[in-house]
Amino acid sequence: MSVIDEIKARTDIVDIVSQYVQLKKAGKVYKGLCPFHSEKTPSFVVYPDEGRFHCFGCGADGDVFTFLEQKEGMSFGEALRVLAHKAGVELPDRRVSQEEKDARERVYSLLSAAAGWYRTQLADKVGAGAREYLVRRGITPETSELFQLGFAPDSWDACQRHLKGLGYTEEEIISAGLAIPKDAGGSYDRFRGRLMIPIRDERGRIAGFGARVIGKGEPKYLNSPQTEVFDKGKMLFGMDMARRPIRESDAVVVVEGYMDVISAVQRGVRNVVASMGTALTEHHIRYLKRLTRNIYLALDPDAAGIRATLRGLDVAREAGEENVVPVALPGMIRYKSSLDVSLYVIPMPEGLDPDDVFREKPELWPELFASAVPLVEFALRLLAEEYDLTTPEGKSRAAKQGISLLKNVYDDVERSHYVQMLARMVQVDPRILERQLWDVGDEKSTRRRNKKDPIFVEPQKLVISPAMDMERRILQRFIEDEGRVEMLMEELAKADMEPISELDFGSEAHRQVFLWLTGGGNGDETVLSLVNEMRSSMENLPPLKLESEAVEELLETLLRLREYRLKERLRELEGIIQEGFSDSHSTEVLEIVARLKSLQDALASYKMRSILKRSV
């Protein structure tokens, strides 16, 4: 028996879930209100014999490890350690040798010692200027203590001398990012004459520093370099304190700077983190998604290169650069769609950043937060400011730039909504924009003969995944004849397979269409518009000679869709393991492989029956 199996065997999933959900026994299972979405009628079921849970409302599903991951925002490794402790199971450390663990702990110890020394320097007479700076920024002594703020005196070796006196070697100090080696030998302190802001990992261990110059000097902010324990592309400042508030509020606010976070926390807003001067990366979003799907960017209109990105496209093309694509904003829109999160922008008042708001006008924050707009809508609003929409040229530029943004919106209903918004903005028929969105065009015809001519960002082809295509095919067959839903259900029951449901559809738009077709949803304007669009393109479907062919096609398409989804999840898990998130996801890998094998067996059996039926 593996360690994971032993933990499962010793753990009662009902006991764990009951700490979060009021469960009532119903036969062999337990039911309650789902902890992952708002509902009034219980659709959350725990199966104690199988050691798993499932919500028939939102689709949440998994074992006791998955439950803690989703509910507490834990990684698999963290959930494993928590449950192992509860079950009294000792975990072997197969990944890191004791020597490596000791070396990492020594780095953390060194950084903690440095932070303590910086703290004493801030309190000393040498830190007077830094203390005055904190007073000007409105930072109280209590907040300074909470964030363990310190000061690095303007000395070439003061920090090193202190650390060496504690027994740390020069090589260790350099490796921790606190000193820089000289070409001629020796080294000097990296941080000098700066306010020191410790950067802690999610477990509260100091992994690096952000340093703000006091007085004149460049750069204004200086971060620790990449080290064994510090990677600013993966870490978020303030995460250790924000983790629980993020879960409790089901929202996270991402700001740009350390002071934004410090001022927010001082004013009682604790679900705030900073990306430390880097763009918000896919890694950041994947981590935050474990805690919440609602991510708010508190940026002023010029922040993070958003305006520069939008303005710089044409300039770059005119300069002769090839394959220029938007970086910051379209990338974020793509993350939003592919990672299935809700991204919002909180526009700041003119001339104010989040730190200014929290220091000078904290009463404005609730109103600003409530006025947040979806990222795509914010992008389209920027276009309206960038271009003169009273002229044909301005409308054309805005429309084409808008299309280049909307190609990154994968959800049909959402994309249709924003196409309508863009159409109203530039005052054109939305069908024209739809055609541009889907039109590939002749690549040669889009090239400009003269670089002095106006350069536009041409819309790129919207790539439809095989899964989206299969979902669409299933829905079109249902639209042809709604009675096929019941017929497919019967076939699935005969084969002892799960009934089709909205959870089979990855696109939210397709889910809404399925629910409308089966009487479980409302047919609003966007849903009916998509249904009409699907109906108008049914002429491209292969003709059917017999009604039985429709059910056969539906069954095979559904099985292939489920197979595709499982393979997608396998690829995602392989990526997670390779990126070092946790090698313990192997349990889920094994479960998916087993489900995939079962599904492929069913698909092969079905195809064999079809061949025999046709040969008779």
Image (tube, rainbow, N blue to C red):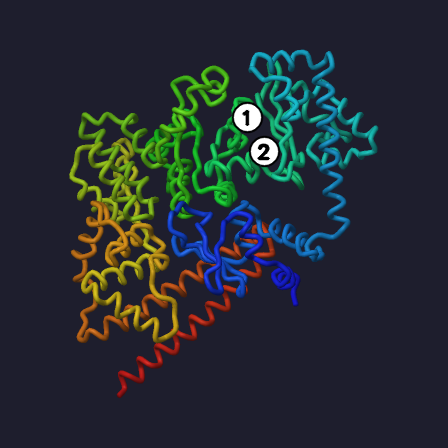
The residue located at (39%, 76%) in the rendering is 604
Q: Quadrant of residue 419?
A: top left
Amino acid of disc 1: Val
Q: Position of residue 316 (x, y in %)?
A: 37, 33
Question: In what element is the residue under mark 2?
Answer: helix
The residue located at (30%, 33%) in the rendering is 380
Find disc 2 in the rendering and name its residue. Answer: 241
Q: Quadrant of residue 488?
A: bottom left
In the drawing, does residue 558 fall left or right of residue 144? left
- Per the model, the C-alpha gap separating discs 2 and 1 is 9 Å
Q: Position of residue 328 (x, y in %)?
A: 42, 36
In the drawing, does residue 469 fall left or right of residue 57? left
Q: Position of residue 562 (x, y in %)?
A: 39, 64
Q: Nearer the viewer, residue 575 or 455?
A: 575
Q: How many marks?
A: 2
Mark 2 neighbour density, 10 Å: few (under 14) some (14–19) many (20 or more): many
Mark 1 neighbour density, 10 Å: few (under 14) some (14–19) many (20 or more): many
Q: Position of residue 484 (x, y in %)?
A: 23, 67
Residue 91 visible in the snapshot: no
Find disc 1 in the rendering and name its residue. Answer: 265
Could you tell me if the residues under marks 2 and 1 are in contact, i.e. CB atoms within 8 Å?
Answer: yes
Question: In what element is the residue under mark 1?
Answer: helix
Q: Which mark is residue 66?
A: none
In the drawing, does residue 541 fall left or right of residue 159? left
Q: Nearer the viewer, residue 497 or 433?
A: 497
Amino acid of disc 2: Met
Of the residues under marks 2 and 1, which one precedes in the sequence? 2
